Image: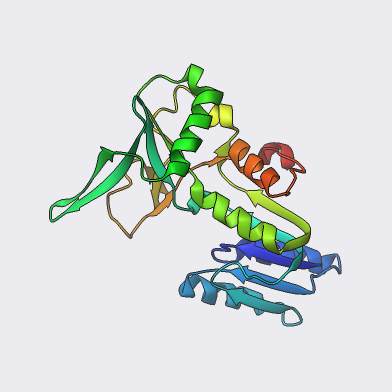
Amino acid sequence: FELMELGPGKGTLAYDVLTELRELNCLPLQMHFVETSQSLTQLQRQKMSEFSDLKCQWYTEIPHEPFCGIILANEFFDALPVHRVRFDEPFQEWYVKVTEHGSDWVLDQVSDPRLLQEMQTILELYGSSMSYPYDSEIHLAHDEKLLQISHILKEGLLLIIDYGFCGSMYYHPQRNTGTLMAHYQHTSSAEVLEQPGERDLSAHVDFTRLARKAFDLKLPLLGYTTQAQFL
């Protein structure tokens, strides 16, 4: 089998997994890393230098070649771009307005018909418990990544480890400002427009929607659990 990790960061998870597999005399035939950051790629290469007998390859995007094995996505989906929307009458979308004095949020019409369709579906599923206006996020970028994975994964599994909720908890009445957050030096803030380019942004994963989209791509759900239950 082979291993692939999406957005491996500093390479810590891959290093720990490979170390354990080596102890079990069960190293993969090849390790694949999908990473856009050159600086993080260098850190990953340094960690992989301890596995001199393992062939490693790096890509800046999910490759197109057929893949058999395990694809790891650890805190990958929560870092993908989102559309920030408002459930109200009518549906609206939040945009970032940039001026010489800085940036701020502004509301306008929804930019993509797919967003309107998603918002209508969410309203039908969870709208009875929402109080309006209700702000949240739509994860269209998840669909693109799942589609790419479905095209290459011929045999094996996709293991997703991430911050998120099932749909009913994602759209909980008290979560009416969404989940979009900024992270910097071990602190988190909802003021995501401050210090642009210096902080990491993330939005929690709606695992119900992710599972539904995967199922549509013939990627059936094998399991769903919390970290505490998994450990």
Residue 192 position, x and y percent, is: 33, 46
Q: Nearer the viewer, residue 219 or 55?
A: 219
Whether residue 228 sits left or right of residue 98 in the image: it is right
The residue depicted at 53 percent of the width and 31 percent of the height is 121
Q: Quadrant of residue 16?
A: bottom right
Could one spot residue 171 in this view of the protein? Answer: no
The residue depicted at 44 percent of the width and 23 percent of the height is 174
Residue 29 position, x and y percent, is: 79, 74
Q: Is residue 4 above or below residue 49?
A: above
Q: Nearer the viewer, residue 136 or 108?
A: 108
Q: Is residue 123 above or below residue 19?
A: above
Quarter of the image with the C terminus is: top right
The colour scheme is: rainbow
Q: Residue furthest front?
A: 113
The residue depicted at 33 percent of the width and 60 percent of the height is 197
Could one spot residue 200 in this view of the protein? Answer: yes
Q: Residue furthest right?
A: 25
Q: Quadrant of residue 28?
A: bottom right
Q: Residue furthest left?
A: 100
Whether residue 194 sits left or right of residue 121 in the image: it is left
Residue 160 position, x and y percent, is: 65, 50
Quarter of the image with the N terminus is: bottom right
Q: Residue furthest bottom?
A: 52
Q: Quadrant of residue 100?
A: bottom left
Across the whole image, how many numbered discs are drawn on residues? 0
Whether residue 45 sits left or right of residue 16 in the image: it is left
The residue depicted at 48 percent of the width and 30 percent of the height is 120
Residue 131 position, x and y percent, is: 40, 19
Q: Is residue 4 above or below residue 185?
A: below
